[in-house]
Image (tube, rainbow, N blue to C red):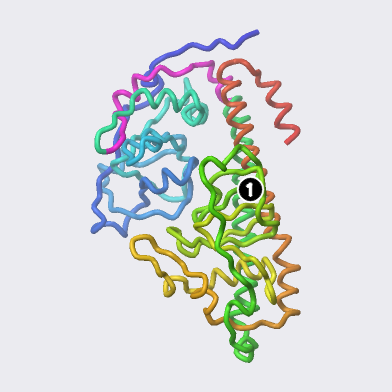
Amino acid sequence: MSLDISYRPFGTLFLIPLRNGLNRPTSVRGKGIKMVNMGELFANNRIGDLPMEKVQVSDDEAKKYLLEPGDLLFARQSLVREGAGKCSIFLGASEATTYEGHIIRTRIDKKIASPEFYYYYFNSSDGRENIESIIEQVSAAGIRGSDLARLEVPYLYIAEQKKIASILGAFDDKIELNRRVNKSISSLTQAVFLKWFVEDKQVESWAIGRLDSLLVLQRGFDITKKDQVAGTVPVVSSSGISSYHDVAKVKAPGIVIGRKGSLGTVHYLDVDFWPHDTTLWVKEYKLAKPAYAYYLIQTLDFEAFDTGSVVPTLNRNHVHSLPVSIAPPELIEKFENFAGPLLNKIHANDRESLTLMKLRDALSLKLMSGELRVKQANKVIENM
């Protein structure tokens, strides 16, 4: 039996009318209650207890502008078209939270519709295509609340909406768990590195040498758009993985440092890769090891060796000359045995999360179109 899917204006599902947020100049921020800004909106699909700026809000404003769990937040404006109409959901927070003027708040009537369902709808390719139809491009891209309310959206019985949202939410819960685990692992390994190689009193007795006594850096390889094919080997630029190739230049594990633009950003890779010519990469480890090198490089002061003018640029020879403490080889080996597997775990979690995101998005389209039923999707969840 096919699902009973109809279409209706989005505004018919609202509990209260749409409302743009509060405008507060930077000069008066710092005290009061938390405010969701565009930065939080673009960085997080699901917004809860996050660090945010605080603003003063009057009692009258609080009645109109405080967020409630399930509120959908849409980016009213963006410098790039892809950001206009971006949808996040407010999950609730331990303290009162409001939102800024470039954000549109939508509060759905939970008696007739599921906010979570429409959060997933507007983050699907169909939902994004719907948003695209109302974007206006002038100096910046933007949407109007009145146009958002008129959008025709799919409607199912609320019980079915909740089931679909629950299935898709299971993917996000696992992705969020991976993110929290990775954050904890990263904090732990960095803390251990600092304790052993920076804060310990023994460090004062170690010899001081140049970075190139521990490792040798090499400039990345040039690659043209023609060379960038739909392969499986990541091409790593200063800002991260920029594309994929079908041939690896460097064997894992490897360290890449941003040489242009994103100055000094450090990437650790546990798969074979192609370092872009905007990077430096560790060609030889000498006394260092990959995990140790990754955390050591993050302690270096790259700003002092910026040789660029308009675009910040690192010179390999200058970086090689940076002074470093020469740690005992046995301590470096001990840290490698500790941190290496943990860094690999972070990457494994990232790859799993990427797979889960792709599967979630594919299921979202099939569930909302009725092509796939909830019982069938539940079998996928059971095998996760």
Q: Which of 142 and 174 is in front in this view?
A: 142
* Quadrant for the C terminus in the image: top right
Q: Which of 104 and 195 is in front in this view?
A: 195
The residue tagged with tag 1: helix, strand or loop? helix
Instruction: Give the magenta range.
Output: 140-162
Q: Where is residue 362 in the image (x, y as percent from the top left)?
A: 60, 27
Task: Residue at 44% x, 55% y: name it.
Answer: 51
Residue beneath label 1, please?
350
Among the 4 quarters of the image, the one containing residue 262 = bottom left
Task: Residue at 70% x, 21% y: name it.
Answer: 375
327 w.r.t. 347: above or below = below
Q: Nearer the viewer, residue 272 or 376?
A: 272
Q: Position of residue 252 (x, y in %)?
A: 70, 57
Residue type at mark 1 is Asp
Q: In this view, does 143 lie to the left or right of 170?
A: left
Q: Residues within 10 Å of mark 1 (few under 14, many from 20)?
A: some
Task: Residue at 36% x, 47% y: name it.
Answer: 37
Q: Does the magenta stretch include residue 146?
A: yes
Q: Which of 244 and 170 is in front in this view?
A: 244
Q: Is residue 254 left or right of residue 257?
A: right
Q: Where is residue 171 in the image (x, y as percent from the top left)?
A: 63, 36
